[in-house]
Image (cartoon, helix red, strand yellow):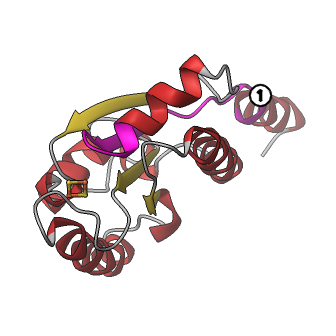
Amino acid sequence: MSPKAKAGKKAKAEAFEPTVIVFACNWCSYSGADLAGTSRFQYPTNSRIIRVMCSGRVDPSIIMKAFRNGADGVLVSGCHPADCHYINGNEKTEQRVKFLKRFMAQVGLDARRLHLEWISGSEGEKFARVTTEFTDTIREMGPNPLTTNDEAEV
Ligand code: FES
């Protein structure tokens, strides 16, 4: 690779700002995001928050669709264990995320691009911290290879 091409690649990497999709449970994490905003906790603007009625509604196919459509990272957040308003939706979410992380490795996606976190409505600071740390991790990893590698298919 020529020095000019290397410099261009480095500049592109430095300019990279990830797109992070956050699936937030209506009853807890979405309120946590709201509290982070009203409390003026700072977190990156990279997050696109999608409110769902329960983290258990986030089907693995929806997560993979987000990656196919350009998400660089996906954060799924729900109620703490035993707090799910639909009894055990978050337990199912935990199993699905574990399964999906194994699947992601098969299609060339680093499993760290998917993260699950329990965030309650009173944890605005935690919402801001988790989204900031996750966005930083994704920024370090670079763009989603499924959207930059034409040969990758899901
Ligand atoms: S209602 Fe929040 S995770 Fe199920």
Q: Is residue 14 magenta?
A: yes
Q: Is residue 1 above or below residue 110?
A: above
| Image-based side of 102 in relation to 12, left or right | left
Query: Residue 112 at what x, y percent from top left?
Result: 52, 65
- Label 1: which secondary element: helix
**Front residue (pair 15, 38):** 38
Label 1 crowd (10 A; few <14 / some 14-19 / many >=20):
few
Residue at mark 1: 8
State the residue at coordinates (47%, 32%). 33
For this orientation, the residue located farthest to the right is 3
Q: Quadrant of ligand 1?
A: bottom left
State the residue at coordinates (19%, 40%). 52
Query: Residue 126 at what x, y percent from top left?
Result: 61, 48
Q: Is residue 54 above or below residue 124?
A: below
Residue type marked 1: Gly
State the residue at coordinates (79%, 27%). 11
Q: Is residue 24 above or below residue 41?
A: below
State the residue at coordinates (17%, 53%). 58
Magenta range is 13-30
| Image-based side of 121 in relation to 44, left or right | left
Q: Is residue 139 above or below residue 106?
A: above
> Can residue 154 be seen by looking at this rendering?
no
Q: Is residue 38 magenta?
A: no
**Front residue (pair 144, 49):** 49
* Quadrant of residue 84 within the rendered picture: bottom left
Query: Residue 7 at what x, y percent from top left?
Result: 85, 32
> Can residue 67 be seen by looking at this rendering?
yes
| Image-based side of 73 in relation to 124, left or right | left
